[in-house]
Amino acid sequence: MTTRPSLVTMTKPTVSKNGAELGLKKDLASSTKKQSKAPARAWQRMLSGRRLDLLNPSPLDIEIEDIAHGLARVARWNGQTIGDHAFSVAQHSVIVEGVCSALSPNMPVEEKLIALLHDAPEYVIGDMISPFKAILGQSYKEIETRLEHAIHMRFGLPAAIPSKLKKAIKKADLICAYYEAIDLAGFDEAEAKKLFVEPPEGMLADVTPLPIPQAQTLFLDRFNVLLQELDQKNQER
């Protein structure tokens, strides 16, 4: 039987038992006291180097690479799905946009992009299951909305989603959840029909969970295709 190396090691500092030791203790006490007076941190450092303020997010601090990286590592269903890989929000987002496009073949490209980004705030705040969102109430919704507006503005989209489009995206989201519930999360068909939206006849969606790098690339590639189409559309106006 092989012994697994420890994931944590601790080296004791070499300090002589004199005034230096007393000074070290005072410094640690002073540092702890200063930290307790500091305001709570409300920002997150991104791998791009951006520092995103969660309470007042700026579009200038949002990068699609950070979104793709985060969403590919956020698990749907709190990770309670079958398979070797979690079913990521990144993969879910691509499928939801695909369902929207299938249900509305003439959907404008900017609306497709909004559909793809419908869960984008979760790259920062994570994917909370619906029952927990209900417990948190309005405070969660306000933070989510601020992030959503900043993300949309960053990519030249309307800050607020029109109600008709919001309903269309929600329907696609619930159709995707129907597939996920049955194929991945242990729901039976009868239960899924009560909680989600049954897909129209002839629609199929592959929800086989992808490894993180593939899910990240899938999301980023689809975003770039839609953004290029949007840029071309805007140039032709």
Image: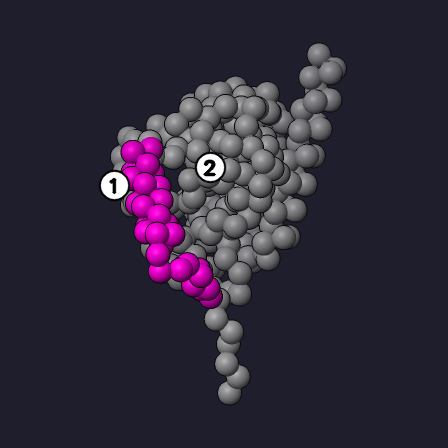
Question: Which element type, helix, strand or loop, lies under badge 1?
Answer: helix
Q: Is residue 132 visible?
A: yes
Is residue 103 visible from the viewing direction of this image? no
Q: Which residue is mark 1?
A: 135
Q: What is the crowding at mark 1: few (fewer than 14 residues within 10 Å), some, or many (at least 20)?
A: few
Q: Which residue appears farthest toward the left when viewing the image?
A: 135
| Range of magenta residues | 9-38
Q: For the point 59% across and 20% down, which residue is it?
A: 156
Magenta segment: does it hold 24?
yes
Q: Which residue is mark 2?
A: 44
* Label 2 element class: strand
Q: Say above or below: 22 vs 231.
A: below
Quadrant including the C terminus: top right
Give the vertical position of 106 relative to 23 (above or below): above
The answer to which of 120 and 58 lies nearer the viewer is 58
Image coordinates for residue 160, horizontal then vertical, percent: 46, 21
User: Is 80 within the magenta?
Assistant: no
Judge depth for marks 1 and 2 and give the one in front.
2
Of residues 201 and 56, which is closer to you in this image? 56
Picture coordinates of residue 137, whole percent (x, y): 27, 35
User: Residue at coordinates 45% horizontally, 50% vertically from top-left?
Assistant: 76
| Residue situated in front as seen by the camera: 53 or 152 | 53
Side (left or right) of 39 relative to 206:
left
**Residue 96 locus on image (x, y percent):** 53, 41
| Residue 30 or residue 9, whichever sits in front | 30
Three-letter code, disc 1? Ile
Residue type, numbered disc 2: Gln
Assign the magenta stretch its main secondary structure. Answer: helix
